[in-house]
Image: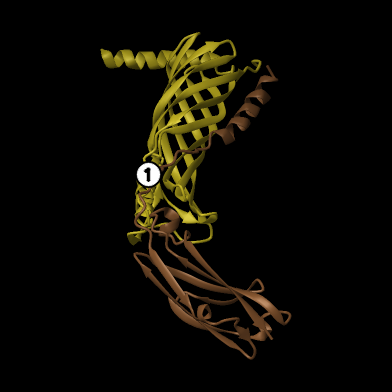
Chain colours: A brown, B yellow
Amino acid sequence: MKKLVPVILAGIFLLYRSCFYAESDVYFVDVVPGDPPIFSVSVNLDTIVEPEVNDSLEVFYGAEIEKGEFYLAQAFVSKSVVFESDSVANSFWLFPGDVPYPGVDTLYIIFYYSTNTNSLADIVRLEANIVQRKYALQFN
Amino acid sequence: MRNRLIILTILLSAATASHRVQAQDLGIYASIGVATMRMDDMKYLLESIIETYPVEARVISSFPPYTASSFGFLKRLYPHLKLGAGYGFTTSGAKANYSDYSGSLTTEITAVSHRVGGLVSYSPISGDKIEFSLLGRLDLNVSRIDISTLLIASGFSNGGESTYTAFSPQASGYAEIMYNFGSFSFGLEGGYLLDLPGKLKESGGSYLSDPNDPRSDLTSDWTGWRAGIKGILWLKFKEN
C-alpha cells in the first residue's frame, strides 16, 4: 500500500507535461499565382569594351518593371558589397581600392524584384526573382 | 411533516457520525478529465491578431475543452463530511495559421491554470460500496497565458512571444459518485467552475489591453464545466 502513493505521484508528474495543450493542424492554402512581372535592365558597362578602373569608374543602371515591384540592386566586387539601392535607376563609383590587388576582377550586379506568386513569402517580400549581371573589370 | 423528516435525518446522520469521529481517515485523491472554459477575451484577441495578418489566416482551434487534472488530500471528519485541500491544473489554447508552399504564419495562445484551494464534501448517500457526494471548492487561481507569433518564409523566420499572468478567485460545485474497494475509491465527478476573471499582466510590465480599445484590459476566464474520473486512496489510522 505504501508503494502505491509514490507510484500515483510519479504518474501524475509524468502525465503533467503531456497534458499541455498542443495543436498541430494548419490551414494550408494552394496559392494562385498572378502574371509574372516583366523586367528589363540596362547597365552602362554593357556598352564599354574592356572597362578599366584607373582613378574611378561610374556605373549606371536603369531597370524597368511592369506588374511588379523592384526590391533591390546590389553590387559586389571581390565578395564585398560596394553598392546597394532600392531605386530602379541609380549610379555608383568603383575605385582601385575596392579590390585587394590590382588586376582583373569581376563586378556582380544583382537585381531583386517581386515574383507575383501571391505566396506568403511574396507578400512579405521574402521571395524575389533575381537577375544577375557580371562584368570583368581591369583594376589598375 | 416533510421538514421534520429532513431535520430528523440530519440529526440521525450527525449522531451516527459522532460515534465514528475518532476514525479520521485520510485520503489522497487524484482526478483527470476534461474542462470547458469561456476565454471570451482570448478568443477575441486571436481574431484581432489575425486581422492584422497580410494574408487570410484561419482560426484552427479556439480554446477547445481540454485536460483538467487535480490532486490533493481529504480528511473524513464525519461519515458524511470530508474536508480537503488540493492543487488543480487545466490547460487549453488557440491557434490561427496560414500556410502555403513558401512558409507559414502562426499565432498560438496557450493557457494554463494552476489553482490551489480547499474543499468541503458532503455525502447524502454513503453506503459501504457506493458513495454520492456534493463538493464545494474555493481556489486561488494563477493563469499563465503565452501568446506567440511566428513567421517562416523562404528560410527566414521571425517571431515574438509574450507571457501574461493573472490571479483570480474561483468557486466550484461538483457532484461525484464513488465506488469503494476497501481502502480505494474510484468514480466519476462533474461540476461547474466559476472564475472571477483576472486581468492579464506581463511580468514586470503592463496589462494586456484590448487592441481596439487600449483603455480596456483583457482577462483570462476559466468559467466552465468539468468532468472526469477520480480515485481516492484511503490511509486508515488506528483509533485512539
Q: Please state which of residues A73 and B42 is positioned toward the viewer in this rendering.
A: A73
In the image, residue A33 sits, relative to residue B72, either above or below, namely below
**Left or right: A71 as drawn, with respect to A139:** left
**Left or right: B97 as drawn, with respect to B25:** left
Quadrant in the picture for the N terminus of chain A:
top right
- Element marked by disc 1: strand
Q: Please state which of residues B185 and B49 is positioned toward the viewer in this rendering.
A: B49
Residue A73 in the image, given as x and y percentages of width and height: 50, 72
Q: Residue furthest left?
A: B1
Residue A91 in the image, given as x and y percentages of width and height: 50, 83
Q: Quadrant of residue B21?
A: top right
- Res B106 seen here: yes
In the image, residue B71 sits, relative to residue A58, either above or below, namely above
Q: Which residue is mark 1?
A: B59
Residue B54 in the image, given as x and y percentages of width and height: 38, 57
In the image, residue A32 sits, relative to residue A12, either above or below, namely below
Instruction: Tell me which chain the residue with mark 1 is part of.
Output: B
Give the residue displayed 62% in from the left and 32% down from the top: A13
Q: Residues within 10 Å of mark 1 (few under 14, many from 20)?
A: some
Q: Residue furthest bottom?
A: A55
**Left or right: B80 as drawn, with respect to A34:** right
Give the residue displayed 50% in from the left and 61% down from the top: B205
